[in-house]
Every structure is written in structure tokens, then in C-alpha cells.
Amino acid sequence: MYPVLKTDLKKIKENVSIIAKRCGEKNIDIMCVTKVFCADPKVAQAVLDGGATMLADSRVKNLMKLKDLNAKKVLIRIPMLSEVEEVVKYADLSFNSELKTIKAIDAEAKKAGKVHDILLMVDLGDLREGVLPKDVDATVEEILKLDNINLYGLGVNLTCYGGIIPSTTNLGELVEIATAIEKKFNIKLQMVSGGNSSSYYLVENGQIPTGITNLRPGEAYVLGRETAYGHPIEGLHSDCFTLEGQIVELKEKDSLPKGEIGMDAFGNVPSFEDKGKMLRAIVAVGQQDARPGDLVPRDEKTDILGASSDHLIVDITHSDKEYQVGDILSFSVDYGSLLMLATSEYVTKVSE
Ligand SMILES: *Cc1c(COP(=O)(O)O)cnc(C)c1O
């Protein structure tokens, strides 16, 4: 039953393998982030087939779905105190920034007879998660006192909140902090994780600082795009995911609504351009499934006019194809809509 979110597993695998290879040439390994497709295990397996050795997600519930896959599982959102038990059970490594939580994980790991790996996040200016550089030393000192916690490394996240672009300067600072920590405490860090898909362009232009040992691509392999500047990555597929919806009505109608215009279904007052009569298809997909502005019709001669909760209206006047009721329209999806579609129980998932 439609709508269907289709995943091309071969393209996912190829995207991952290219990124893994280009990062590998710079001595960088990758953990692939699975949150945008809700960690569907089949897609995650394709990621592993492409050469990733670690799977990362922001939600423990997603890591649970991956428990049978042969890879190191990483929790990349700072854990909630309410999920510490699950973190120890389902994550092999978790990202942290709060001593209170790290101590709770230590206690839980002790109960489970485990030593839990953590990555300490450092905030280098994006103002999302992480301890400030001035607090790293004192935090590390406390972490090293805990018997059931292993400080696996340091990491940074950029761009997602503050829009800060990764550079040789801020990533260089992370490497400097890591080196200073190793020296001061006489320890060896196994990972210095230099960010998400927005750091990838530094791999391609050769400017990624030596000492960054890991990146965490999500969007880069999912949509084939780096996210510092939004450029497509050469050689990668941008169409791994496709939304398919079915036409439920197809009629020639005016382009201008008739009568006094008030608010639409979402409280906005719409405006319209008079393009005369047009052939309009209603596809059974709506704002509940995806944001219409995030969808791009694969038939380039069609145009999305708008959507209410459950109806997507498409101008098919100029298409070369003679569509009929029951036909399927396909769309490329952007990040936000992919997340919504993957999360929705109304959308059938097919991967092949
Ligand atoms: C979501 C996320 C990523 C992946 O981000 P992309 O922009 O999809 O590459 C990496 N690291 C952290 C901490 C994240 O939250």
C-alpha cells in the first residue's frame, strides 16, 4: 500500500564505500549515522557492507534495532539519566558532556560487570553539546577516577545548531586539546572525532587536520551531499531514497481558487498565480508524511503546487506522460522529509 519509501541498498552501499575509501586515505575511519532512516537494520547492513565498522544513532531505541548487526554501536546524543541502563546494554560507546551522567553510567556499568567507552564532547563554538575547552582538563581528571568508564576519545559537533563551519582552525583546536590531554594525563586516546557531514569537504580538499581520526557522516552518504556548503559529493548517488505516492484524483481545473480566500489548513493565507486551466493530480501523501517543499518530482515536467495534511497537489499539465488515476508519482526527498517519512507508521518501507 502506498505511500512507499523506497531505499536502494546498492546505492547506499556504494556511497558509503566511496566515503570510507576517501576518509581511509587520510587515516580517518567513519561511524555512519543511521538516525534519518530510523536505523532500519536492512539499510544499516548495507552501510556495513559498504565498509563502515561503526553504526551511530542518537536514540537508544534505534540502537536496539541494530543489536544483531556485527558493528560497534555508538550513541551520539548525550544520554538521558533515564536511559543509562539501556545505554550500557545497547551502546558500545556513548558521547557525553555531563559528569553527573558519566558517573551514573559508571555505576550502571559496574552492576553489569562492564567497562563502558565514552567520548567526551567538546564545544568549539557551535553551542550545542560539549564541555567548553577551559573545562576539559578538570572533566577528564574526574572521568579518569571512574573504574568502569574508559575515556575512548574526544569529539566535536559543528554546524547542526550554530551553523559553524568546520575548519582547520576549530578542528585543529580539537586535535591540540586531545594531544595536551594525552600528555598531561599520560593516556592514549583511541578516537578524535571531527564532526558530521559538514566536515567531509575538508577530507576532499586535503585540509582535514592530522590527528582527526574519525568522522560521523549521515547526510553525506544518505543524500550524497556535504553539508558545510550543501554541494553534491562527486561520484555519489543523490537518489538512494524515493517516495512513491498514488494518484487518487486527476482533473483539469482552474489555477486560481474561486471565492473569497481565507486561511488554509495550517492557518496561512495562501496566494495564487493565474496560469489558466491546468491538469491537476492529487497524490495521497500530505504534510503528515512529508513537507511538500522538501519533495522534488522525478518527472521534471511536473510541479508541486502544495499540500494539506493528506493531499499533495501536483501540476502535471506539461508532463510528457499521460498519467491516470492509480498511477504512481515518484519524488526525491530532502533530509527533513526523509526523517518524517522514515518515522511515520503510515508509510510503507521497501528496501531492495
Ligand atoms: C546527526 C549527527 C551526526 C550526523 O549528521 P549529518 O549532518 O547527517 O552528517 C553526527 N554526529 C552527531 C553528534 C549527530 O547528532
Image: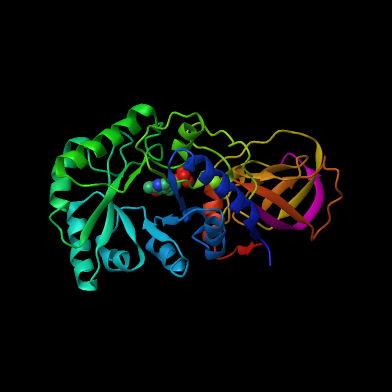
Residue 8 showing in the rendered view: no
Q: Residue at x 40, y 34 (%)?
A: 163
| 20 vs 83: above or below | above
Q: Is residue 298 left or right of residue 105?
A: right
- Residue at 50 percent of width and 29 percent of height: 205
The colour style of the image is rainbow
Residue at 67% over, 51% down? 312
- Please tell me which residue lies in front, 57 or 151: 151
Which of the 4 image quadrants contains residue 91? bottom left
Q: Establish if 290 lies above or below 66.
A: above
Q: Is residue 307 above or below residue 174?
A: below
In percent of width and height, residue 41 lies at: 52, 65
**Is 199 in the magenta?**
no
Measuring from the top left, give residue 106's x and y in whole percent.
19, 62
Residue 194 vs residue 87, the one in the foreground: 194
Most frequent secondary structure within the magenta stretch: strand
The picture quadrant where one finds residue 167 is: top left
- Position of the C terminus, as image quadrant, is bottom right
Q: How many labels were placed on the picture?
A: 0
Q: Is residue 203 left or right of residue 288?
A: left
x and y percentages locating residue 208 in the rendered image: 42, 32
- Percent across and percent down for residue 209 are 38, 32
Query: Along the line of sight, which residue is nearer the eye, 43 or 270?
Result: 43
Residue 248 inside the magenta-drawn segment: yes
Q: Is residue 283 visible?
A: yes
Q: Residue at x 24, y 64 (%)?
A: 115
Q: Which residues are magenta?
A: 242-258
Relative horizontal placement of residue 141, taking residue 295 as reference (left or right): left
